[in-house]
Amino acid sequence: MFNLEYEKFKKKNSTSCRIFEESKLFTPCGVHSNYRVHDPFPIFVSRAKGSRIWDADGNEYIDFNMAFGALVAGHSHPIIVEELKKALEEGTIFGHESSESVKLAKILCNRFNLDMVRFNSTGMEVTMYAVRLARAYTGRSKIMKFEGCYHGSNDNLLVSVKPHLSKTGHIKHPISVPASPGLLPEVSKYTVVAQFNDVESVDKLFGKHGDEIAGVILEPVAMNMGVIEPDPEFLKTLRKLCDEYNSVLIYDEVKTCGKWFGGAEEKYGVKPDLKTLGKAIGGGIPLSAIGGRREIMELFGPGKVSHAGTFNANPLSVKAGITTLEKILTKDALSRAGRLGEQLANGYRDIVTDYKIKALVSSIGVSGAVLFTDQEHVRNYRELLRCDFGKWFGYFISMLNRGIIPAATGPDEQWTISVQHSSEDVEKHIEAFKEVASMIKDIKQPLEMVEAV
Ligand SMILES: Cc1ncc(COP(=O)(O)O)c(C=O)c1O
């Protein structure tokens, strides 16, 4: 059914195909992140501005991937460009602190209700530090994570990220499945896995390993399983259990910190001990942060818990962070982008209803996702696995052919609306989906996934 679309994609993207072939000679799989591979080949981008991206073949797209959610500010926001131009003239890296980093630390502490904060560049680093802090604070070794949640490519947390169903075990007692060769076998022994939105599975793990569990880390909204919100009692129960067992509760907000103004605590009213922030806060420049309770954060220091990084708090990232948070991702701007998010999700909902397509549309703040499934809800990884991924990739390629990058690459990802998207951009996305939906409605059987991400 989607064969014609795949053929059309190849024709429209012959230059990307050629670059991809050359890239594969020098770079494994031709890409610099495993998450960028998809069938038949990824587009190679030549430039981007606002809500638009142009590829090497000159095709123009309205971009709703937005660098996997890192670009809620949109591509090359003019204010960030202006500020960075000035900053470039004044030193790109000092290897010393500056008063500007104090300013950014204050902004982050106020906005995300943190006592203290330290900067890094990527999400992977800050989740690694969160685990280290939790272990140092409690003197314990084990970390609890949730099946299907992704916390970056650090060894401690590369467990049960996208395990094959055959390896996952009982839904209430997921097996810890290493997500990559090359990890020490001990890693999965020290990382125990619970089911998202299932307090019973958490309770059981605490019952079994309670006095060994240093911390519980989760994406408060599971943004690496599409968009799965926590059930009303889920976060509250996690807080209660962490208090009962003296474990550190960690929200990985690398994605959610940019979806609305104040992050998960503001929305759900449950305060964790540590938060990790990343992606959107840098407005397109690498910037991440770990922050939380003073008592835990103060463990960082010479002779205490190691925390380092040559590029930490470099003036370009700091300037981008201040500019993004103060001038661009304001409450008003994020509310407006959030309304566009609702417009897009409602457009999808109307279409799947009109065409009688079995699909679920979820949305939160500036992001949302469509999953092709006849289930009534998708609340955890096991339910995500029952969705039709083959159909999703067919939809993805067909949308690209219509000038829309509908979401980040993969059915476990989502779309992101930036503050530079317009209502017309959203309308064009909806129009393209209408065309693609008219093909999808005739596909009754689940489709084979062409290639796993
Ligand atoms: C929730 C979450 N945490 C951490 C990371 C890792 O961030 P980075 O790719 O910047 O290392 C990601 C990346 O997608 C993420 O979604």
Image (cartoon, rainbow, N blue to C red):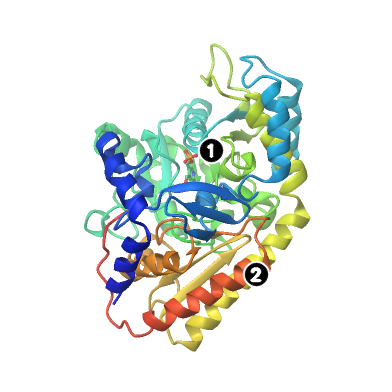
- Classify residue 171 by image quadrant: bottom left
Is residue 41 toward the left or the right of residue 62 in the image? left
The answer to whether 112 appears left or right of 188 in the picture is right
Residue positioned 60% across, 44% down in the render: 272
Name which residue lies at 55% across and 74% down. 430
Per the image, label 1 sits on a secondary structure element best described as loop
CA–CA distance in space, label 1 to label 2: 50 Å
The x and y percentages for residue 453 are: 32, 53
* Amino acid at circle 2: Glu
Q: Is residue 405 left or right of residue 239?
A: left
Report crowding for label 1: few under 14, some 14 to 19, many 20 or more residues within 10 A (C-alpha): some
Q: Residue at x 63, y 25 (%)?
A: 313
What residue is shown with label 2?
Answer: 424
The answer to whether 100 is drawn above or below residue 61 in the figure is above
Q: In the rendered structure, which amino acid carries the disc numbered 1? A: Asn
Percent x, y of residue 6: 31, 66
Foreground residue, 290 or 88?
A: 88
Q: Is mark 2 within 8 Å of ligand 1?
A: no
Q: Which mark is residue 246?
A: 1
Name the quadrant of the N terminus. Answer: bottom left
In this orientation, does residue 206 appear? no
**Label 1 close to label 2 by CB (< 8 Å):** no
Residue 326 x, y percent position in the rendering? 77, 42
